[in-house]
Image (cartoon, grey):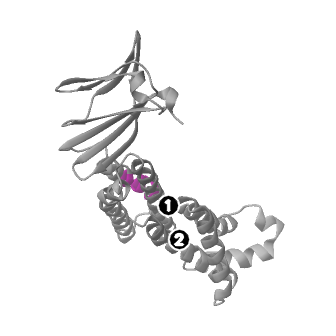
Amino acid sequence: MNFRAVKLAVVLPAIILTSLAYSDVFRPGDYLLAAAFGIILLGTFLSRDSASGTVFLSTVLYAVPYSIALSQFLPAAFPEAYRNLSEAILASPYFSSPLAIFALMALSILADYVDTAEAWENVLRGLGWRGAGGKTLLYGLPVVLLAFALSLGLLWLGKSLGLSTAGILLPVFLLVLGVAMAYSSIESGSYRRVIVAVEVPPLNGEVVIETPDGSRVMPLSRSSAFEWDTLRLEAELKKRPTRVVLRTGDRREVLTPLIESADGETLFLLYREKGGEG
């Protein structure tokens, strides 16, 4: 999957929305300012390759006019300038409706979702799971988009019924988003296969993988590492392990999953010793 193209598809709407909003407030009809803002934000994305960082910057810039319009200090310090500017801001279609802020919130979450999937792809590629990050993104994306559509529908319903959306928008959005993330979480659901990988430094001992159906013991030998500084063990299970324990002599350490990724009906889990992270 081309993550750069996917990130551009998320970033460009935020850049265009913020650029047009500034142009409409400060220079109505003059798209040169919008182009300048767009080039700066696009350059920020291309230099950092961070979709979430760029959309966050766009959201912060979009919130500045709101801060100006709602300021309590500016009317006292600059009454005439504030009156003209605040009227222009509140009269702009980009700031008179909560839909733009809603869209930026949705794009911010999508951008972070795509960045996370790309990070999974980069790590899992090194473990032989090429394409897992992209498949994970596609696996949960429909549920996240459905959550946004449902939140937007609730916003429209509240407005149609004459309810104040200012008080209910954020709680409803967070509630629906929480439900979406719960259902799209890779920890939920059932899987036909569970691939468990355990990375530990060269040592003598064993790894015990405990499941609801029993446990599997995987021995460790320092001599098997040869010139490598990490031992990697893999096991295929039918159910998610309840616990993974590293035993070395009298020492016991319960390992926690460092990475979890779902590919259709296969769940991949990477465990690593805490002292070996980084």
Is residue 95 visible to us here? no
Q: 129 left or right of 105?
A: left
Residues at marks 1 and 2, CA–CA distance in whole angstroms: 9 Å
Q: Nearer the viewer, residue 245 or 97?
A: 245
Residue 108's tag is 1
Q: Dot 2, how many residues are within 10 Å of its Cα: few (below 14), some (14-19), or many (20+)?
A: many
Query: Magenta segment: does it hold 55?
Result: no
Name the amino acid, label 1.
Answer: Ser
Residue 14's tag is 2
Q: Nearer the viewer, residue 206 or 213?
A: 206
Q: Position of residue 126 (x, y in %)?
A: 42, 48
Picture residue at 32% right of the left edge, 58% below the top: 135
N-terminal of the pair, mark 1 or mark 2, is 2
Magenta portion: prevailing SS class: helix
Q: Secondary structure at mark 1?
A: helix
Residue range highlighted in magenta:
169-177
